[in-house]
Amino acid sequence: MRLATLVPSVPAGLVDCLEKCGIRTDTDLLFTPTLDLYRQLPSGTITLRELGKTIARVADLASAKGTSGVDMLKEEVDAQSKSRQLSSGVSELDQLLNGFGGQHVFEICGDRQSGKTVLALNVVLRHLSQSENTKVLWMDTTGDFSVDEASRILNCYITESASGTALERLQVSSTFDIEAAYEYSANTDTRKEAKLSCIVIDAITPLLGPLLSAVSAQGHSMMTGFMHQLRIFAQTYSCSILVINNTTFFNPSNPYSALANAASTRKPALGPSFAFLTDATLWLTKAGEQDEADPKIRYTIHTAEVLRSKITRSKTWCTFKIAQGKVLDYAPDQ
């Protein structure tokens, strides 16, 4: 910080004299011994005591304001109370991450047919059906978003108070590159009556995967910058963000999973560093299928495991089922 920007807190005449002595920034002033500095100034410019007070004033103006832990805790509690809560409706699944709300970025990853998109649709449609003054932005990066499937899942929540306008408040945008993703997130109007409560990126792999290279760090830098912007957006607008990530081959097994039966040869895509760019990573797998003749009682069984989390315990897991597009509690004796 240049000393000239601190005028009139620091006398302009003193700043001019300091600049003539080569002291132009707060760093120059603070790291020059006071006696040496006093000897360099013209006689009668300032007294030694006043110079010491001036240095202390500059140090105070140039430093960040301290915040007590009590104040930080109060701010966090207030933010959580104001944040919009999103959940799947499955008690064990929601307990893994304390729901999908808050000012967090969640990664949902898994192989094909693991239930990633279905879970995200259940979370947002359930939320939109219960809260009429909210909206959700869904970034479709593959062109696979199905209105029919969304409508079918919404029928599971038809008894909720705001279900009639839920699809109207689900804004779907086709996003095929990272520049478009930046534009959509930057132009999202959070000041309207219906507040943005969640952003879903399905999937983030096609956006960031082509940028990564083994011979250049530029793609990794762009990935880090993009995820940093998502985090800032989530914290600024009390908005949760769900990013769906695909998988990649790994031999001999997934090193991140704690499940004894997870002899999977798949792991989350985008490299090991991506997990540290989100607040939690939820790994989904398809564990089985109940193939009943009656489609109304047919369902698939899935497991959800927290591979890594900053907000809850890692290496915890649960089992749930998906029947007619809705995620439900699962009991082995059912």
Image: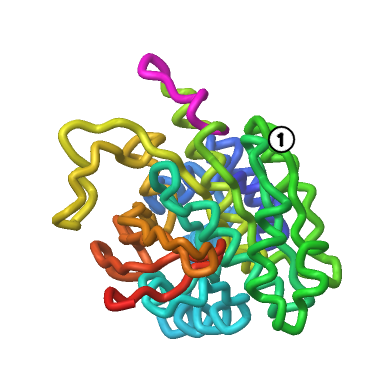
Q: Quadrant of residue 240?
A: bottom right
Q: At 51% from the left edge and 60% from the top edge, which residue is drawn?
A: 119
Q: Quadrant of the C terminus?
A: bottom left
Give how far across and how far down residue 141 sits, in percent.
63, 37
Give how far across and how far down residue 188 sits, in percent.
77, 53
Q: At 46% from the left edge and 63% from the top edge, which residue is drawn?
A: 298
Q: Is residue 2 above or below residue 214?
A: below
Q: Report the number of numbered marks.
A: 1
Can you name the residue that lies furthest to the top here? 215
Q: Which stretch is magenta?
A: 207-216
Give how far across and how far down residue 158 sits, in percent.
71, 77
Q: Is 226 in front, or is 63?
A: 226
Q: At 51% from the left edge and 71% from the top edge, which residue is drawn?
A: 88
The magenta stretch spans residue 257: no
Give how far across and how far down residue 228 sits, in percent.
53, 47
Q: Is residue 47 visible?
A: no
Q: At 67% from the left edge and 36% from the top edge, which residue is drawn?
A: 143
What amino acid type is highlighted by mark number 1? Ala
Q: Is residue 210 above or below residue 142?
A: above
Q: Is 115 in front, or is 202?
A: 115
Residue receiving disc 1: 180
Q: Is 147 in front, or is 253?
A: 147
Q: Quadrant of residue 325?
A: bottom right
Q: Is residue 150 visible?
A: yes
Q: Please, what secondary structure does the residue beneath circle 1 have?
A: helix
Crowding at dot 1, Cα within 10 Å, few <14 / some 14-19 / many 20+, comes out as some
Q: Is 244 in front, or is 72?
A: 244
Can you name the residue that lies furthest to the right here? 192
